[in-house]
Image (cartoon, grey):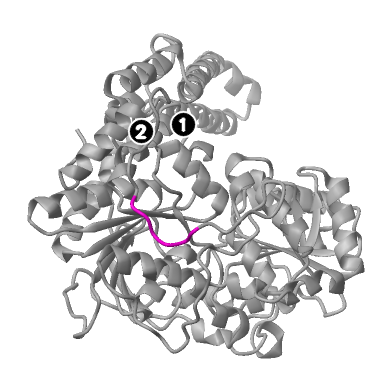
Amino acid sequence: MEFDSGTGTGGTPGAERRSAPAGRRGRIVMLVCNGVEGDSRVQKTARSAAAAGWEVVLLGRSPDGRPASWRLGGAQVRLLPVPTPLDRPPRIARRPLLTRPLAYRPATAPYRAQRVKAWRDELRTRRAALAADRRSAVYAAARLAGPRAAARLAQRWVGFRTRQLDRGTALRGTGTPLDRAAVAVWRRARKERCWRRLWPALYDFELAYGRVVDELRPDLIHAHDFRMLGVGARAKVRAAAAGRPVKLVWDAHEYLPGVRPWQHDVRWLPAHLAHEREYAPCADAAVTVSGTLAALLREAHGLAEEPAVVLNAPEAHAATGPAGTGDPAPGSPASARTRPGPAADGSGAADGGNGGDGGDGVPSLRALCGIGTGTPLVVYSGAAAPQRGLGTMVEALAELPEVHTALVVPRPSAGYLRELRARAAELGAAERLHVLPYVPYRQVVPFLAEADAGAIPLHHWTNHEIALITKFFEYAHARLPLVVSDVRTMAGTTRETGQGEVFRAEDTADYVRAVRAVLAAPQRYRAAYERPGLLEQWTWEAQARTLDRIYARLLHQAAPERPDHQEQPEGDGNADLRGGAREDRAAAGRPVRGQGTPGDGRGHRRARGRERQRRGGALPR
């Protein structure tokens, strides 16, 4: 689950300089393609690296097109404008001439539709004026019969041509024969380089970030997820050409082949897959979010060893200590949104005093829902989308008349959530569904702890099957019994630890059964968290030590001993189940190099990967 930015003070955009005090271990530039505030993994990575003695600059994408800067702990955050003219190639503006020859051009349809509406409205006004002047509605109707018939006919014609455009556009997104042929041709002709033709918008990020990264002269680049991998790899190439060796760490947040395309276009996924394949060999080390995903990445890219596992776990002090310390300071973009207040849907909530504050500045979940401590409450926290299974939770309200459900989401006013509230009203449960906004990520665990159970009702998607997502660990630190759908990794871990119940995804009746089970005997499931060492392994501090070892190894440094440092066995120590508890995998950082066996379909990629590394990371051709 992702939450707003933590502590910080305002900064001056573009005023970055090497100002680290003497004794700093090196400069790390982190890259992310979002606005930072909603990404807790990125925020924790930057904050913990700065606390470990690295000079950290985190570059993100400005959501409003204006530069911004602030402090995040010891790290500096800079948001850059990212113009996206390459996101609208000329083919988007063409009408589907072959499949829908009568369709409008995309820019023409709205104009024509509005013009014909204006014409018909003008005729209605003229008819009213004639009727008033001659005091005869019959005369007015007869006088304007011809123009009115012409306007109706024109509106139908415009509607028909607009529908032709809509259908042609939808077909283009799912893939016309011509589009699919173009994808196949470019993939065969240019292989990993085909993304330049299929999805040139990826280069918009390079043009926005590249010069800034070069000016910062990093010792190490930490590229978050697949879009930033290419930006980091090309910056590494330019630095090598200038005689400055730079190391690249690739942080794979999800399994790209299992991602639902962010845009409805048949070119999107093949292009992004090719982009990732081209630049993965340029990384000096890779990390990812679960052991299952690490194994998939190793297989997909022919890596010499599996990437290190860095779990999306909460910070220990955020889970057990004073949560109020995480409030953003004035100047941070999040500062205006951290005070407790009523839910965006109007449900619940008191503001101020004990009504909306759980102490130490943490909002009270139950106060915001307007319920007392004796009312059963199931919470979901995270992104809101149909594949997240929130519809199952709403449908279940009809079978759980005593239970309230809280959805803690980034945008409570989003259209999908309005649909869910409307469905709850149809079921007579509107007053038991509460839609609440995110809180700062350091307040998440104590905020959620007031619930009786935490739900993860995901549908069966590839990335859902392999992930141990952030909310899983946040619920655990909040000591909540879990209600988890039978997606592979989380269901397996839940069964192994005994911290909750598993139900069949999209099965409302089975979800109801699981909720009733955990509410009937909560202490049975909470007892799982008393297992020695379990929650200690599921903390960000333990994960940050893995990252620190990677940085230190790549830059040939010894990690400094800290008073709070405790030696941990290599590996994430986590049950990453594909049928049972798996063995711990080594968690130290490893070089990412092409490797494989003849005839597996990856030989040409691996050979080029080794050659690039021998040339010091030259730009892939």
- Residue 177: image quadrant is top left
- Tell me which residue sits at (31%, 25%) in the image: 191
**Closest to the observer, 124 or 578:** 578
Separation of disc 1 and disc 2 at Cα? 48 Å
Q: Which residues are magenta?
A: 586-591
Vertical relation: 231 (above or below) 176: below
Examine the rendering and report whether any part of residue 428 can be seen: no
Q: Position of residue 109 (x, y in %)?
A: 42, 25
**Closest to the observer, 171 or 523:** 523
Give the label, 1 or 2, closer to the camera.
2
Quarter that holds the N terminus: bottom right
Q: Position of residue 57 (x, y in %)?
A: 28, 69
**Helix or strand or loop: what does disc 2 sit on?**
helix
Tag 2: amino acid: Ala
Disc number placed over residue 118 in the picture, else none? 1
- Tell me which residue sits at (39%, 46%) in the image: 226
Tag 1: amino acid: Ala
Q: Position of residue 281 (x, y in %)?
A: 31, 43
Q: Specify whether residue 517 is painted magenta.
A: no
**Closest to the observer, 324 or 422:** 324
